[in-house]
Amino acid sequence: MESHPDRRRESVWDYPRPPRVEPSTDLIRVEFHGEVIAETTRAWRVLETSHPPVYYIPAADVALAFLLPGSGRSYCEFKGEARYWTVRVGNRAAVHAAWSYPNPRPAFASIRDHFAFYAGRMDACSVAGERVRPQPGDFYGGWITSWIEGPFKGGPGSAGW
């Protein structure tokens, strides 16, 4: 894991609510079962109080042949209805490993036709060459790097935050 000591530290408690979406030019990479599922320097990151960043990767930079529509939906009060995706490479699959917002609310229109991935369901995810740690909990999909400080929602005792 590469460390970034010169990078400005960020506290998730300084992130806004409602969330903010901003462009990222960091190299974002997602790997599963020996394949690069996504790689881009054109991601959007969504920042929300108590959550590590979630990176949304443009469809043009995702190997869509490895994504299969999943079942179920969820609803975010800020972004709208999410659709889930299974990542399948050969005989290995990660169910509900990615999600997208086909028709996001206007404030999040920039993430339309983009995909986010649960780092814990992939073999490796990285930001600027640093392998990320997944946000605690089974629901949240934030990516934790050395410059992101918590505590993070999703861990034990955080349900009421």
Image (cartoon, rainbow, N blue to C red):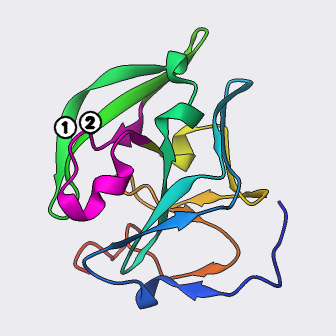
105 left or right of 157? left
| Residue at 41%, 84% in the rendered image | 15
Specify the amino acid type for callout 2: Arg
Q: Is residue 110 above or below residue 49?
A: above
Give how far across and how far down residue 79 sits, in percent: 23, 58
All told, the count of numbered labels is 2
Q: Earlier in the sequence, mark 1 or mark 2?
A: 1
Give residue 83's mark.
2
Packing grade of label 1 (10 A; few <14, some 14-19, many >=20) is few
| Residue at 52%, 82% in the rendered image | 150
Residue 100 part of the magenta segment: yes
134 left or right of 107? right
Q: Say which residue label 1 marks.
A: 73
Residue 97 part of the magenta segment: yes
Q: Nearer the viewer, residue 126 or 92?
A: 126
Give how far across and how far down residue 48 sits, in percent: 36, 75
Q: Quadrant of residue 131?
A: bottom right
Q: Is residue 76 above or below residue 148?
A: above
Give how far across and how far down residue 2 sits, in percent: 85, 64
Specify the amino acid type for callout 1: Arg
| Residue at 20%, 31% in the rendered image | 72
The region drawn magenta spans 96-114
Q: Nearer the viewer, residue 2 or 157?
A: 2
